[in-house]
Image (cartoon, rainbow, N blue to C red):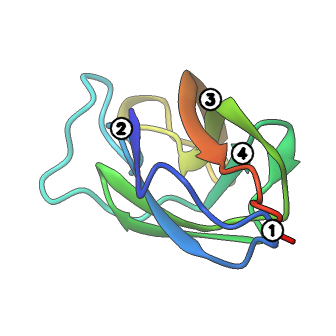
Amino acid sequence: ARVVPSEAATRGGETVTIEGFSFGNSDIDGFLDPPRAPIQVEAWVGNTRCTSTSWMSDSSLRCTTPPGTGGNLSVSVAVTAACTEDVYYNGCERTMTGSSPNVFGYPTPLVTS
């Protein structure tokens, strides 16, 4: 996965795009044409949850960055989707998670006198 842009202000509140795969509902083989929005998506920068996460497509999410510091942070995603039709029963859900290390950072603030 990758994050665009790969840096954001330490104050948070900036929108970044998380690019990856399997962010939507899919069948048992991982395909559904067209992909449908999952029940819920969540994303984290390091250990801090994005203030909001929205599904854009099967390969793209938007995250509003939380306040933070540091570089080489991981970005993690949790996607809750309805079960596939072959194992479906009313209310059946599954949550899939994934993480990419060292893909995001908050630049160090520059202090001048």
Q: CA distance from mark 3 to mark 1?
A: 42 Å
* Nearest to viewer (mark 4 / mark 2): 4
Report the residue that reaches farthest toward the front: 113
Q: Quadrant of the N terminus?
A: top left
Residues under labels 4 and 3: Cα distance?
14 Å
Give how far across and how far down residue 30 sits, in percent: 27, 29
Residue identifier under label 4: 45
The residue labelled by disc 2 is 22
Q: Is residue 74 above or below residue 111?
A: above
Between residues 51 and 40, which one lies in front from this camera angle? 51
Q: Nearer the viewer, mark 4 or mark 3?
A: 4
Few, some or many residues within 10 Å of mark 1 (<14, 14–19, 20+): few
Q: Is residue 29 left or right of residue 95?
A: left
Which one is closest to the eye, mark 4 or mark 1? 1
CA distance separating discs 4 and 2: 19 Å
Are the residues tagged 3 and 1 within 8 Å (C-beta)?
Answer: no
Residue under circle 3? Answer: 97
Amino acid type, residue under disc 2 in the picture? Ser
Q: Residue 18 vs residue 67: left or right? A: left
Secondary element at tag 2: loop
- Amino acid carrying label 3: it is Thr
Residue type indicated by callout 1: Thr
Task: Locate residue 22 relative to residue 98 in the image: left or right.
Answer: left
Q: Position of residue 31 (x, y in %)?
A: 20, 37
**Which label number is shown at residue 112?**
1
Measured in 3D between alpha carbons, the distance from the residue under mark 2 to the one under mark 1, in whole angstroms, is 45 Å
Quarter containing the C terminus: bottom right
**Circles 4, 2 touching at the beta carbon (< 8 Å):** no
Q: Which comes before the other along the chain, label 4 or label 3?
A: 4
